Amino acid sequence: MTCRLLGLAHRRKRKAQQAKRFGLPNGEPDLLLARVMANGFSKAAIHLNSRGLEQQRFHARAAEATRARFGRRVFLRGVVEPSNFCRENCHYCGMRRDNQSLDRYRARLDELSELLIHHRPTSITDLNIQTGEDPVAVRETVIPLIRRLRDQTPLGISVCLGTLKPEMYDELQAAGATIYIMKFEIADAALYRRLCAPGCLEERLEHIRLLASKGWKVSSGFIAGLPEQSMPELLSNLEVARELPIVGCSVSPFIPGEATPLHDAPTGDVELTLNVMAMLRLMRPDWVIPAVSALNLAGPGSGYQRGLRTGANLVTMNLTPSGIREDYLLYKRDRFIMTEERILSAIEAEKLIPSEQSLSDFYSGNEEKNVSAAALA
Ligand code: 5AD
């Protein structure tokens, strides 16, 4: 079905459901807020703008909700980026196909597997393999890499590779990946279109549903503080996330990317981003919510720590070889790299403990054999 038809059918269905659920006429201007509030968000919606002591208390509540469900465990995942070719053209992303100032690369399979099998940091239990939307790299590098990692390491494997053909999802799954990260990016269909996010919103949501129906554990995500994003638009991300068959969700602050049409736009407010993260956590105490690396651009060195203090329970460590890492350009070249040492000290500073169980085992319900009582306390 085309994007337009998918969109129409889904919007009609959602409108009917919403009207029924909230007893409100379609198209009412503050319908969104009313809906959010009707579901117990009235206080949280006010918290979007909260600052100072009140904000600290709000974030502490979110962190407590995480502790009640997950204990003090935090998942640690490595990230490797085998290709920065991308067929999409998102206005916010530095890897967009129109960025001709970027050196494009595809990493060598042997180099990556040697690095990940023999020289990875000992603290990571999972690995996320992430690329621009590049089916060639998926076939030539990602799938064989997953097979090798499955054979030779206990790592849980996540992938974040964009919208692909369904057969390719199957091949990735057969190779041994279990978690698919597919961010829906922007819940408002008009803003999604204006910023040329991948395909169209309905198609993106369809792929998320398709992946979940095929047995993938799907994690999603969205961007907070995009230019022209109104508060209701921002809140609608929570609403879309809530309806999806996902097990985790991220919130990234908008970072004006180098060589993108939005390079001049203001950076998304990190306080607003953290407030949305806290709302997400209180909405879904059982989800895995990462402290995203973009938080470290907002406050070098303290981003992960603030994320953890707001209820995040996953942190990532970049393992892309340094010669090519600079060209994996989501935002700017001066990415603040969190080393294993920095990450472990951020976790310790928050009195948390790195999980010994992989995210992949956690999702598949494999009980951890050697989880210490201290970690669950
Ligand atoms: N600001 C914040 N997040 C961004 N991403 C890409 N560009 C930006 C940006 N400028 C996020 C998108 C994408 C992921 C790989 O990085 O959500 O899916």
Image (cartoon, rainbow, N blue to C red):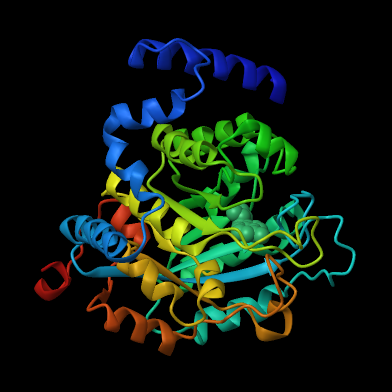
The image shows residue 174, relative to residue 191, as above or below, that is below
Residue 105 % position (x, y) = 79, 71
Say which residue appears at 50% left-offset and 76% top-offset: 299
Say which residue appears at 44% left-offset and 85% top-offset: 340
Instruction: Give the side of residue 311 with respect to residue 94, left or right.
Output: left
Quarter holding the C terminus is: bottom left
Res. 234 in view: yes
Say which residue appears at 17% left-offset and 67% top-offset: 369
Residue 194 % position (x, y) = 74, 39
* Residue at the right extreme, as displayed: 100
The image shows residue 189, relative to residue 25, as above or below, that is below
Q: Ligand 1, what quadrant?
A: bottom right
Say which residue appears at 60% left-offset and 44% top-offset: 229
The image shows residue 23, relative to residue 295, as above or below, that is above
Res. 177 in view: no
Instruction: Give the side of residue 98 with respect to residue 129, left or right.
Output: right
Query: How many numbered dots are placed on residues in this image?
Result: 0
Quadrant of residue 132 within the rendered picture: bottom right
